[in-house]
Image (tube, rainbow, N blue to C red):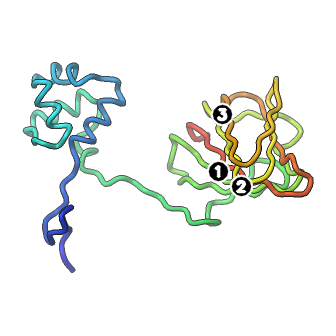
């Protein structure tokens, strides 16, 4: 067994961790400018820019200070990204109370920021006659195939393959396959996960 390789393919050298890119993402996520972070840490804006481009490596003390300002742990810079793969048809089956729908969870149950569901809805299948509310901020439905109807408190929206609709998650709603003869297939994206 050989050791890890660097990006150029040389055996035995560990690949470098893109610390600067991760710091830049954290800085932007907090809405901070290069100048604000540089001033707070006591480095120049130019130096910080070079750190974020991974052109230079900061000292340990500077790295600790940078992480403190952008609100992340130093260890987060070195952690491998957490990934999850769900193969076609293998998602965990859920049932939200509708009829004629097979709903598969595509995101891991440990994922709290977003939840993605794949639903196959039989002809005339629905979320039920009563509108319901999910404890989430935003819902988005994307129609992969078929006809799909989303019924909100004040409006009903007809969707076809390729259409997407986004609405507040706490909006009372229900849905149905608008076709009496063809199945519908949709993706639901809920944020944060209910």
97 lies left or right of 179: left
Secondary element at tag 2:
strand
Comparing labels 1 and 3, the label whose residue is closer to the camera: 3
> Real-space Cα distance between discs 1 and 3?
15 Å
- Give the residue at x 21% y 41%: 20
Q: Mark 2 points at which residue?
A: 103
Residue 93: horizontal and vertical position, in percent? Answer: 68, 59
Q: Name the residue under label 3.
A: 166
Observer-nearest of 56 and 76: 56
Secondary element at tag 1:
strand
Q: Quadrant of residue 114?
A: top right
Q: Which residue lies furthest to the left in this view?
A: 59
180 lies left or right of 149: right
Which comes sooner in the sequence, label 3 or label 2?
A: 2
Comparing labels 3 and 2, the label whose residue is closer to the camera: 3
Check whether the beta carbons of the residues at disc 1 and disc 3 lie within 8 A of each other: no
Residue 44: horizontal and vertical position, in percent? Answer: 10, 24
Q: Residue furthest bottom?
A: 1
Q: Residue furthest right?
A: 180
Q: Mark 1 points at which residue?
A: 117
Which comes sooner in the sequence, label 1 or label 3?
A: 1
Q: Quadrant of residue 105?
A: bottom right
Secondary element at tag 3:
strand
As displayed, is residue 101 above or below residue 62? below
Circle 3 residues within 10 Å: few <14, some 14–19, many ≥20: few
> Real-space Cα distance between discs 3 and 2?
19 Å
Check whether the beta carbons of the residues at disc 2 and disc 1 lie within 8 A of each other: yes
């Amino acid at each position: 067994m050989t050791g890890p390789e660097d990006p150029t393919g040389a055996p035995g050298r560990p690949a470098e961790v893109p610390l600067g890119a991760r710091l830049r993402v954290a800085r932007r996520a907090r809405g901070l400018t290069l100048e604000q972070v540089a001033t707070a840490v006591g480095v120049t804006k130019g130096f910080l820019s070079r750190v974020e481009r991974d052109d230079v490596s900061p000292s340990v003390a500077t790295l600790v200070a940078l992480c403190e300002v952008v609100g992340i742990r130093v260890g987060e810079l070195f952690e491998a990204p957490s990934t999850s793969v769900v193969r076609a048809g293998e998602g965990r089956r859920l049932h939200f109370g509708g009829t004629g729908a097979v709903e598969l969870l595509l995101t891991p149950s440990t994922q709290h920021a977003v939840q993605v569901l794949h639903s196959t809805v039989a002809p005339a299948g629905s979320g039920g006659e009563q509108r319901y509310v999910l404890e989430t901020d935003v819902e988005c439905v994307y129609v992969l195939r078929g006809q799909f109807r989303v019924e909100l408190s004040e409006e009903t929206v007809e969707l076809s393959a390729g259409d997407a609709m986004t609405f507040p998650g706490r909006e009372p709603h229900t849905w149905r396959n608008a076709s009496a003869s063809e199945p519908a297939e949709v993706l639901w994206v809920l944020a944060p996960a209910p």
